[in-house]
Image: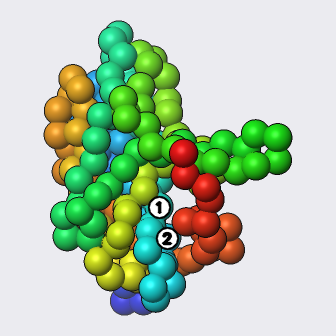
Amino acid sequence: MNRILTALCALALSAAAVLAQDYTAGSLDIRHPVSRATLPGQPVGGGFLTVANNGAEADRLVSIAAPAVSDDVQLHEMAVTDGVMTMRALKNGIEIPAGATVELKPGGLHVMFMAIKQPFKEGETIRATLNFEKAGPVEVEFRVEAMKPAAAGHGEASHD
């Protein structure tokens, strides 16, 4: 009986940890902010999350700040045109249309932590502030997960 209670407690705690990565700001639901572990000497790291706008008005993610890990955090878009991968900073941010969900993920829209101060290590968290045009600032934590093969070369794209 003791083992069953221990297992149930462990399951409840792990479920709570997953749910702890969801945030709400006004009509916006921010889900699963995550980054990937980086290699020593790697100058940049990526950030990924999903934003659902349950409201009747569009909002815009205009900036992000994470001073403990980078003094320069940018919103980027990656695209492949004629077989050439490019990445560019989005100076006007990312629109979150009313009733829509926008996913920031590898190979598309994403966060770039530039000139990171130390490598991102699996299991750590990155505190950041997402700044929305209408919903305002939202404090989140990006959970650092294991490096994946596609993420290892993430910073090697050409920047426009």
Q: Which amino acid does label 1 sit on?
A: Gly
Query: Which sits in the foreground, 116 or 19?
Result: 116
Residue 46 position in % (x across, y down): 47, 61
Identify the residue at the far top of this view: 56
Q: Which amino acid does label 2 sit on?
A: Arg
Numbered label tally: 2
Q: Is residue 95 visible?
A: yes
Q: Looking at the rendering, in which quadrant would you find the N terminus?
A: bottom left
Instruction: Evaluate if marks 2 and 1 touch, with contact meaning CB atoms under 8 Å apart.
Output: yes
Residue 146 position in % (x across, y down): 53, 78
Q: Looking at the rendered structure, which numbered label has been put on residue 66?
A: none
Q: Mark 2 points at which residue?
A: 36
Q: Which residue is drawn at 41% across and 16% down?
A: 98
Q: Which residue is drawn at 39% across and 78% down?
A: 120
Q: Which residue is drawn at 20% across and 43% down?
A: 138
Residue 2: name its quadrant.
bottom left
- Does residue 154 appear to the left or right of 142 in the view shown? right
**Neighbour tally class for label 2: few under 14, some 14-19, many 20 plus, Cα within 10 Å:** many
Q: Is residue 105 visible?
A: no
Identify the residue at the far front of this view: 160
Q: Looking at the rendered structure, which numbered label has been put on residue 46?
A: 1
Residue 154: name its quadrant.
bottom right
Q: Relative to residue 45, is residue 48 depicted above or below?
A: above
Report the coloring of the rendering: rainbow
- Does residue 5 appear to the left or right of 67 in the view shown? right
Earlier in the chain: of badge 2 and badge 1, it is 2
